[in-house]
Every structure is written in C-alpha cells, then in structure tokens.
Image: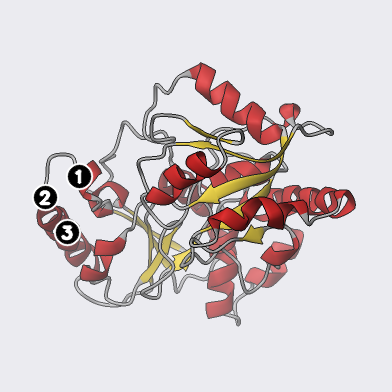
Amino acid sequence: MKILNTRFTYDYAPHVAIKTEETIAGLLERDKRLISDEFTLVKAYLGGLLYTNSGWAGGEDIAQRIKRAQDAIDEITGKKNKNYIFLCQDVYENVKKINFYRNLVFTPHYSSHGFSVIPHYTLRYDDALIRKQKSYLFSFMGATHTHPIRKRLTDLYPDNCFSSGDCWGGDMDFSQIKIDRYVSLLGNSCFSLCPRGAGISTIRLFESMSMGAIPVIISDRYKPPLSDQVDWRSFSVAIKENKLNKIENVLKSFTADTIREMSQKTLDVYRKYFSNTNLHQTIIIELNKRSPGTCITQLMRTYRFNKPL
C-alpha cells in the first residue's frame, strides 16, 4: 500500500478523546506491506470536517462544513477514483451530499452509500474489572440527549439504565468518577445495551465487547463490521428500536450457560478483530476481498496483528 500525505492533518475536533482515524492510520502505515500497492492510504483527518451534525458543527452551519469537506476531497483526489483509502471517524446523514468519486471510505458510523464499516476506537475499558458473577442482567450508562431512544431506555428501566449527563467520547476531561462507574458497570453486566446516538453506531458496542458484556444492538440501520465474515448473532443481540419494552423479557430468556458462552465469544471476537491493536484488520480483510490476487492472505497467516504501535 502506498501512503499519500496531505495538508489536511489538523485535528478538527481536539476536544474529542476518540482517535479512530489516527490510530488506524498508524497501524495501516506500519503494516502497509500487507496491502497491495494498488491502494493508497490518504493521511487526512477529515472526521471533524465531515462531522455535519448541527450540534457539534463548531460554529459553522452544515452547508459550510459540507463545502469545506468537499473542497478538501476534490483537492486530494483530483475528482477521480484512484483507489484512495479515506478514514473518517464521523460520517453522518449529510455525508450523502459529499462526492468521494468512488474512492474507498471506511467509517464506524455509516453503513450506506457504499462505505465500509470499521470498529470504533475503544476509549474506556479495564478487563481486570470483569466479574464472574454479574449483578446486572443488563445495563446502560451514557448521554441521553444524543437520541430519543436513550432517554426512553432510562425511563423504561431506571434500575438498569443511567444518564451520564454528557457525551461519552466528547470531552477529554470527562469525570474520572463517571468513567470508573461506567467501566465497573460494564464488567458487572451480562448484557450491555448499545443504542444508537448522534450516529447510527456507538463506541459503547466495542467497549462492551472489551469487557465481556454481550452487546444488545439497538440501531435498525446499523450493519456491524465484518458482518459477512463474523456471526454476530452468536455473541450479540439485536433489538428493534420500536421494541424497547421487550428488552427485559428477551434477555431473561437466555440460560446461564448460553450467557457464559456468548460472553466468552464476545471477548474472543473483540480481541481478534476489534481491539485497539487490531483496529485495522477490518480494512485489511476488506481490501483483500477487493484484490484477491495479492499476497495479503499469505502474509496474514504469518503476521501477529496484536503488536502495539
């Protein structure tokens, strides 16, 4: 894989602690020999530009933000499909107005418009806090203002679902007391409710997996990464957005043995594909499918992906 450096390396959201783009770019550059030279990784942190959610637009209106992002993409691509790889942490509804000229876009948030889904960077976890005996069948703790579903969960299940009062990844100075409570809650829960937020996915999905809490995905349009390769039904539960009142009965139907098996598989899949040291595996697997004649497959058999940066 080739590397294209650009002038668009400014962090447009320095207050946000989640660094999916930077982490994956570093891992891909380190392991570029695993990927065919027909692909080029674009080093441009466009996530802040593409975050067109009006609430976090940094004083700009959505139209201005979209134009700024489009101008950057036009400059980088020359308005052509060059098998460029774009990494975008924040891609939301209005991104359909942006033309990537059929280059490759990898994002945790949007699974439409031909984009490929990747995992979120896992921000908060501590596997030392995973309990063998769980006190909660299910739980949720997070911001409730990012989508109405979240507020409905705290109203329906006040003994299990709690508002953090703030956006989870949106503040570098988030209260350590709240962080400790959140991580402890994940480690003490059989299932973790993972409702959509401002985007259709949530970092909570991967933080839950890292703690062995079986994720309950509540986002009708979300397609998890590697859905064609990994059997998500074997270690997660999907609940329709209009079936929130059924959650408790559905989860009570799982036996203790099944919960233990699903919890272990959740951890195994997370560590193999989605941990912070393996965030780039999803992209390598996707590119290998697009270019099956390369030597990627053989290299993947012999390379240890869990080496830190």
Which corner quadrant of the image does residue 224 belong to?
bottom right
Q: Are marks 1 and 2 in contact (CB under 8 Å)?
A: yes
- Nearer the observer, disc 3 or disc 1? 1
- The CA distance from mark 3 to mark 1 is 10 Å
Q: Which amino acid does label 1 sit on?
A: Ala
| Residue at the disc numbered 3 | 66
Q: Of helix, strand and loop, which one carries label 2?
A: loop
Q: Of helix, strand and loop, which one carries label 3?
A: helix
- Please state the horizontal and vertical placement of residue 126, each as a whole percent of the image: 66, 29
Which corner quadrant of the image does residue 296 belong to?
bottom right
| Residue at the disc numbered 1 | 57
Can you name the residue that lies furthest to the bottom here? 293
Q: Is residue 305 shown above or below 308? A: below
Q: What residue type is labelled 3?
A: Ile
Going from N to C along the chain, the mark reached first, 3 or 1, is 1
- Using the image, tell me which numbered label, if any, was put on residue 61: 2
